[in-house]
Image (cartoon, grey):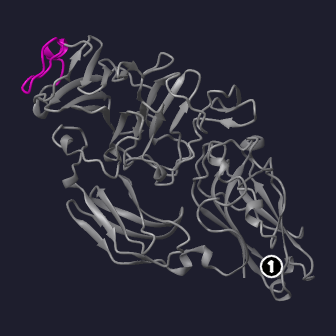
Amino acid sequence: MSGSTGRPLGRRTFVLGASAAAGTAALAGPLAGTASAAGFGWSDDGSNYVVDTGASLVFKVSKTNGDLTSLVYKGTEYQGYGGKNSHVESGLGTSTVTIGQSGSTILISVTYGTLKHYYAARSGENNVYLWTNKADDSVSATRYIVRVKAGLFLNDEPDSYTYAPTTIEASDVFAKSDGQTRSKHYSKKRVIDYDYIGWTTGSVGLYVVRSNHEKASGGPFYRSLLRHQSADGGGLYEILYYGENQTESQRFGLQGPYVIAFTDGGAPSSSLYHANISTSWADSLGISGYVAASGRGRVAGVGISGRDTAYPYTVGLANSAAQYWGSARASDGYFSIPGVLPGTYTLTVFKDELAVYTSSVTVTAGATTTLNTIAIPSSNDPSNASAIWRIGNWTGSPSGFKNADLMTYAHPSDVRAASWTGNVVVGSGTETSAFPCYLWKDVNSGIIVYFKLTAAQAAAAHTLRIGVTTAYANGRPQVVVNDTWTSAVPSPPTQPSTRSLTVGSYRGNNYTFTYSVPASAWLTDTSAYNTLKIYVASGSGTTSFLSAGTAVDAIDLLA
């Protein structure tokens, strides 16, 4: 082991580095224990605490600022690029860094003001367990980035911009010579969609296994950067609060563990996944804010009625302190959400990404709160309303609209995107696939929907609904019917103020605009097409794809 004391490790041996022997490392309480495996232990090289897991991994943590300064797996250094280390946010300043060992666990504690961060190693494992306890907003974001040397993993996935020399937006969205776009933002995944992120060569895998995100913000459908590669190297992220396209305030407290895991090329062990991981070994380590399994409760529901079985349903729990979610069983809607901190939560049932039911539930430690069948009222799902015509379906996402899937991993200017302009004819069979998922003031404002009405329909007033999932620069739809009736400019709903549509995310606050269209607006000739022109109203934004815009969920004209 690098920097070892030269002292053999036995069942009752505690490896002391020079600083530890001098009393600068914390060796009190539960961490004043013993090591248990040959090769497992820690030392002090003067600048770093050096941890040998007794397997194939040796890592170093700076005694000055808590950076992870080295990750050596099977003799190869993986950590670092551009003179930068792996760390919380963009790196902490001077911190108090201590180390201790208890049996088969080594814990490094980093204190930076009110923030506390932890690294743990277990004997015989090629893993580093991490926790971060952010007490307030003195640190702007809650992010850990594992920086990886260039050339160790090949990648040209949607989140890679290694071969993308042209900057097309800000300093983080790039275009390749073939017109395809790349950015670290283009993860393609929601939080609910993944357990880990990383790379493999086939013989070596390096991953970050995410935490349960109980102290994160944004819920199960939040999208954020997960990894990137450039000419300098690669980055793997655990993002808890990034400040970009956030729909909720920050949550504070201890988050973790999330795990840096090395493998022999395969996926990380499923025992590390947030739904499966057991950290009973950490119960007595004294980690600030740590709550053991015995201090948590569970929420279970016997079923959900009133579902549209064509869509997945998710049950979420949220309050100002924590968030959780679980998938409802397709057959009957049964759900179970374990590991919940005690408290009262808003329970929300989502049809796909659209909230269709809310209630309140209280969780107590060591107990299961069992709920009877949740009945979703028919009126709670806007898809149940009788419509003369409908474009898309009410799901809380632009799924099915033109370019919708591509926009989670590409910029709107990408060569693979279909034209953002072009009008739509109701009854053509391509209403949804032809309608663009996003509308911008400077790109495709004024798109036209053509439709016919029967004499009875044209004789009555109707409600037009346009559902959106987010907006940029207060973009919102204003409509004109048959060039004779113009709606008022609606007030903008609350939406995130940062970029969204151009960085792979449509996830904001779902909102429905309603317009009461009088009978006098319709054409009386039943053979003629009525026209609905949808404009984007806003005085903010800049130009092109950074002009005011919005993402579409569904559009319908009610009967």
Left or right: 146 as drawn, with respect to 231: left
User: Which quadrant of the structure image shows residue 387?
Assistant: bottom right
User: Which quadrant of the structure image shows residue 134?
Assistant: top left
Provide the major secondary structure of the magenta segment: loop
> Picture coordinates of residue 217 (x, y %)?
45, 49
> Picture coordinates of residue 365 (x, y %)?
21, 59
> Picture coordinates of residue 111 (x, y %)?
29, 28
Q: Residue at x 51, y 66 (%)?
A: 312
Question: Which residues fall within the magenta stretch?
Answer: 5-26
Q: Is residue 527 above or below residue 448?
A: below
Left or right: 315 as drawn, with respect to 524: left
| Residue 116 can be seen, yes or no | no
Amino acid carrying mark 1 in the image? Pro
Question: Residue lying furthest bottom in this view?
Answer: 456
Which residue corresponds to mark 1? Answer: 518
Q: Residue at x 76, y 55 (%)?
A: 536
| Residue 522 can be seen, yes or no | yes
> Split into 4 quadrants, where in the image is the N terminus?
top left
Q: Residue at x 42, y 34 (%)?
A: 265
